[in-house]
């Protein structure tokens, strides 16, 4: 868990085994859409709206980010760690919400997620 959750609402998403790595699930908390993502190393949750024009990330893809040390040396880092907007391909790190291209100024909201008694729980 990222921060103190005592003043946040507990939202059960599903059973842990209901989602496989690479799966995404949308939940509604009050009037806010939240996207829950399962990666190989755990569960993450982000606000389900791109800050550019509001597209829902649930239709976007999860993948890594391409890096190159040389023209012929391209590799992918953080496989499945970035959510891409389905409209204009803006990308955000699902762990911290930072934009790949402007991490200091463009971010999406992230939420605390934990697994409690085999239930995936988002605190928002």
Image (cartoon, rainbow, N blue to C red):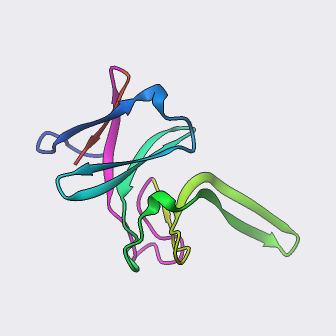
Quarter of the N terminus within the rendering = top left
Residue at the (56%, 73%) spot, across then down: 89
Q: How far across and down, in percent of the image, does residue 94 sit?
A: 46, 55
Tell me if 4 is positioned left or right of 25 in this view.
Answer: left
* Residue 2, placed above or below residue 101: above
Residue at the (60%, 51%) spot, across then down: 80
Residue toward you, 82 or 14: 14
- The image quarter containing residue 39 is top right
Residue toward you, 107 or 52: 52
* Residue 49, placed above or below residue 15: below
Residue at the (76%, 70%) spot, across then down: 68
- The image quarter containing residue 8 is top left
Examine the structure image and report whether residue 47 is included in the region drawn in magenta.
no
Q: How many marks?
A: 0
Q: How far across and down, in percent of the image, does residue 85 sit?
A: 50, 69
- The image quarter containing residue 123 is top left
Residue at the (42%, 71%) spot, across then down: 55
Q: How far across and down, in percent of the image, does residue 83 sit?
A: 52, 60
Residue lying at the far right of the rendered structure: 72
Q: How far across and down, in percent of the image, does residue 32 sit?
A: 24, 58
Viewer can see residue 64: yes
Query: Which span is picked out in magenta?
Result: 95-117
Residue toward you, 23 or 64: 23
Tell me if 12 is positioned left or right of 42 in this view.
Answer: left
Majority secondary structure of the magenta segment?
Answer: loop
* Residue 82, placed above or below residue 18: below
């Amino acid at each position: 868990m990222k921060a103190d959750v005592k003043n946040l609402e507990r939202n059960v998403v599903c059973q842990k085994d209901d989602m496989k790595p690479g799966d995404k699930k949308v939940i509604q908390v009050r009037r806010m859409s939240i996207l829950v993502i399962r990666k190989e190393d755990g569960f993450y949750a982000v606000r389900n709206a791109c800050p550019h024009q509001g597209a829902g990330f649930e239709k976007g893809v999860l993948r890594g980010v391409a890096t190159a040390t040389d023209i012929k040396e391209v590799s992918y880092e953080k496989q499945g760690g970035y959510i891409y907007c389905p409209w204009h391909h803006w990308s955000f790190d699902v762990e911290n919400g930072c934009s790949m291209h402007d991490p200091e100024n463009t971010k999406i909201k992230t939420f605390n997620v934990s697994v409690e008694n085999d239930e995936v729980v988002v605190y928002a």
